[in-house]
């Protein structure tokens, strides 16, 4: 039965029972899964489905499929008739492990967050009509879903780097730089993006290959004097 992982079950059982018992239980379950494959009712079914059916019906019938199970054991060369009576306890352990594993995987996939940071260059219009700029010293950090970073990494640099920009980037600018008064700042450009200890300088990337990707080399028009 391909769905049974003996090593995984044994590792789990070691947190619940003695190590020698865990090894025995895991080995016994392997024999049981082979017997299930030889039973017409369970042939080709997932182990979790089989055990759920077995536990549910055995509550009402303590000898549920006993003859069929013992016959299947003999067919695979086992004479351990005690496996039938001990199967209920092992089945409950296995289903509990499956439920915990599923819950952990679900929680991880739904709440996995990681920190991404951006740094701005702030541009100022001077009286003589020339532009000057101020490089921001501090990083603005925010949390994003890890799947967004994974998607960006998979799709490649630098064309999809705007996926890493925060949705509230305009508000972040106001929160961090809006306090600057009596200045003629007219716009801010996202200059550097940092994720997973990697820094990407957008200006360097733009010089290399993607002037046309203006959404990625992003300009934000913001009035700071208000």
Image: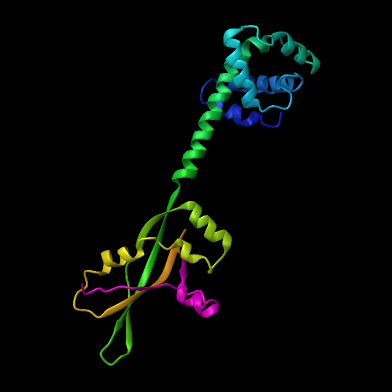
Can residue 21 be spotted in the picture?
A: no
Q: Check the image and report above or below for 80 versus 198.
A: above
Question: The N terminus is located in which quarter?
Answer: top right
**Range shown magenta:** 198-226
User: Is 217 within the magenta?
Assistant: yes
Horizontal arrangement in the rendering, residue 48 relative to residue 72 (left or right)? left
* Residue 11 pos. (x, y %): 57, 29
Relative depth, front residue between 84 and 163: 163
* Residue 77 pos. (x, y %): 80, 16
The picture quadrant where one finds residue 94 is top right
Horizontal arrangement in the rendering, residue 180 relative to residue 85 (left or right)? left
Q: Check the image and report above or below for 75 versus 205.
A: above
The picture quadrant where one finds residue 123 is bottom left
How are the residues colored?
Answer: rainbow
Question: The C terminus is located in which quarter?
Answer: bottom left
Q: Which residue in the rendered view is the most extreme toward the bottom? A: 128
Q: Residue at x 57, y 10 (%)?
A: 59
* Residue 57 pos. (x, y %): 60, 13
Q: Residue at x 53, y 76 (%)?
A: 210
Q: Residue at x 43, y 66 (%)?
A: 193
Q: Which residue in the rendered view is the most extreme toward the left? A: 182
Q: Check the image and report above or below for 18 versus 117.
A: above
Q: Check the image and report above or below for 77 versus 49.
A: above
Can residue 105 be spotted in the picture?
A: yes
Q: Residue at x 54, y 60 (%)?
A: 153
The picture quadrant where one finds residue 176 is bottom left
* Residue 12 pos. (x, y %): 55, 28
Relative depth, front residue between 48 and 4: 48
Horizontal arrangement in the rendering, residue 25 relative to residue 196 (left or right)? right
User: Is 207 within the magenta?
Assistant: yes
């Amino acid at each position: 039965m391909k769905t049974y992982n003996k090593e995984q079950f044994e590792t789990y059982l070691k947190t619940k029972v003695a190590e020698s018992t865990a090894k025995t239980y895991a080995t016994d379950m392997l024999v049981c899964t082979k017997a299930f494959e030889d039973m017409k009712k369970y042939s080709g079914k997932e182990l979790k489905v089989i055990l759920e059916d077995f536990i549910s019906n055995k509550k009402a019938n303590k000898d549920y499929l006993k003859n069929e199970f013992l016959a299947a054991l003999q067919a695979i060369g086992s004479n351990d008739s005690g496996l039938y009576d001990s199967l209920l306890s092992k089945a409950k352990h296995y289903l509990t492990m499956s439920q915990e594993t599923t819950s952990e995987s679900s929680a991880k996939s739904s709440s996995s967050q990681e920190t991404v940071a951006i740094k701005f260059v702030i541009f100022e219009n001077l009286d003589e009509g020339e532009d000057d700029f101020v490089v921001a010293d501090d990083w603005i950090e925010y949390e994003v879903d890890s799947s967004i970073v994974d998607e960006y990494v998979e799709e490649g640099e630098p064309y999809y780097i705007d996926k890493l920009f925060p949705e509230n980037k305009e508000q972040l600018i106001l929160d961090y730089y809006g306090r600057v008064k009596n200045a003629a700042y007219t716009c801010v450009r996202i200059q550097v993006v940092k994720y997973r200890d990697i820094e990407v300088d957008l200006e360097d990337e733009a010089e290399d290959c993607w002037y046309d990707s203006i959404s990625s080399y992003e300009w934000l028009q913001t009035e700071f004097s208000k």
